[in-house]
Image: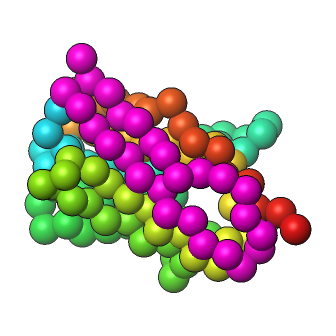
Amino acid sequence: QVQLVESGGGLVQPGESLRLSCAASGLNLSRYTMSWYRQAPGKERDMVARIITTGGGTNYADSVKGRFTISRDNAKNTVTLQMNSLKPEDTAVYYCSAQSWPYSYWGQGTQVTVSS
């Protein structure tokens, strides 16, 4: 059974940092493009960061470029999202996703709240 489990969310003040982790079981993350998405209340789920399998190339949403960093540890079968200089508009539920056509897997999400 495939499972993606996110952790590391919480409540922080503007300007602070959080590190999200996504741990996988039942699949080899090194074979998947891994992404973090987020969904704020009343909004669409949007891609935040992505790291591909070959070469480890990354893509980021314009709103997080320079602040967020996605990385993968294939030996530990995990993907992390380092989030720095957090802003209130980063508040959302963050989801981990593993994609390799035609397969797509999602975690349950972890809440990130940025508020003073």
- On the question of residue 38 being in view, the answer is no
Q: Nearer the viewer, residue 77 or 63?
A: 77
Q: Nearer the viewer, residue 72 or 34?
A: 72
Q: Is residue 60 left or right of residue 103?
A: right
21 in magenta: yes
Q: How many marks?
A: 0
- On the question of residue 25 being in view, the answer is yes
Q: How is the image coloured?
A: rainbow
Identify which residue is drawn at 48% across, 56% down.
Answer: 20
The kind of secondary structure the magenta stretch mainly shows is: strand
Identify which residue is drawn at 87% across, 68% down.
Answer: 116
- Which of the 4 image quarters holds residue 18? bottom right
Task: Say above or below: 58 vs 40.
Answer: below
Task: Say above or below: 1 vs 56.
Answer: above
Identify which residue is drawn at 65% across, 44% down.
Answer: 111
Q: Is residue 115 left or right of residue 82?
A: right
Residue 44: give x, y in percent of width and height: 66, 40
- Which of the 4 image quarters holds residue 96? top left
Furthest residue toward right: 116
Residue 53: give x, y in percent of width and height: 16, 55
Task: Say above or below: 18 vs 85.
Answer: above
Q: Quadrant of the N terminus?
A: top left
Identify which residue is drawn at 66% across, 53% down.
Answer: 10
Furthest residue toward top: 1
Q: Is residue 103 left or right of residue 50?
A: left
Q: Which residues are magenta?
A: 1-26
- Which of the 4 image quarters holds residue 29? top left
Q: Nearer the viewer, residue 55 or 86?
A: 86
Residue 112: give x, y in percent of width and height: 66, 52
